[in-house]
Amino acid sequence: MKARLVFATLAFGLLAACSAPEPRTAHNAARPLEAGRAIPLIAQAFEETGIQPEGPREIQLPTGKKLRVDVSASGHKWGIAYLTSSDLAHLEPGRDLPPRPTNDDLAIVQGHGPDAGSVVLVLFADEYRADDHLGEDRQKAGIVAEKKLQRDVRDFVVQAKARKLP
């Protein structure tokens, strides 16, 4: 009798161990890089290209709304806005923002009124997706998102310098 109980316990344990893994859920799906991680990466990319980054400021858009520029170039009127879903909720995509690029183009907005001459690269957070769970593949996705973000910033800085933006 004791042997049957031990066998049954072992058999149940083996069945439980061989069950299928939990299906992937929205909880562990890739999410946009959080602004708290993205903004220091943007500032770092500025420094790597020889530009001193400055803290946030706002510019006026042609519609009269304000756009937060998360990282600005010291001594210049250009910078980067990293837009999260909560930032987008306050803006009208058709009026306040350019159309989202469908390729590797960069989205640019220009200041208006007192901010005329300001040029801002708009980075949409949901284009820089990473998985914050552990695991080699998930860590690679985060690294890829961070590298893409920094590449886009460097591309903009190179263009800003070449065009001698104010």
Image (spheres, grey):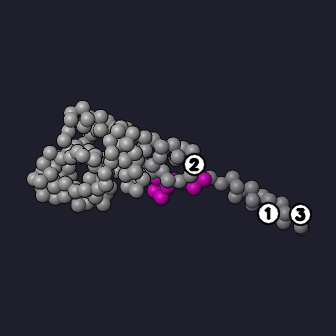
Quarter of the picture holding the N terminus: bottom right
The vertical placement of 117 against 6, above or below, is above
Lateral position of residue 149 relative to residue 100, left or right: right
Count residues near mark 3 (Cα–Cα under 10 Å), then give few for <14, some for 14-19, many for 20+: few
Q: Residue at x 43, y 44 (%)?
A: 146
Question: Magenta-highlighted stretch: main secondary structure?
Answer: loop
Residue 133, x across and y down, in percent? 53, 53
Residue placed under numbered mark 2 in the picture: 135
What secondary structure is marked by label 1?
helix
Lower position in the chain sequence, tag 3 or tag 2: 3
Tag shown at residue 3: 3
Q: Which residue is mark 1?
A: 9
Mark 2 surroundings: few (<14), some (14-19) or many (≥20) residues within 10 A? few
Q: CA distance from mark 1 to mark 3?
A: 10 Å
Quadrant containing the C terminus in the rendered view: top left
The disc labelled 1 sits on which kind of residue?
A: Thr
Residue type, mark 2 in image: Gly
Q: Residue at x 74, y 55 (%)?
A: 14
Q: Residue at x 26, y 53 (%)?
A: 69
Q: Position of residue 161 (x, y in %)?
A: 26, 35
Segment tinted magenta in the rendering: 21-29
Amino acid, disc 3: Ala
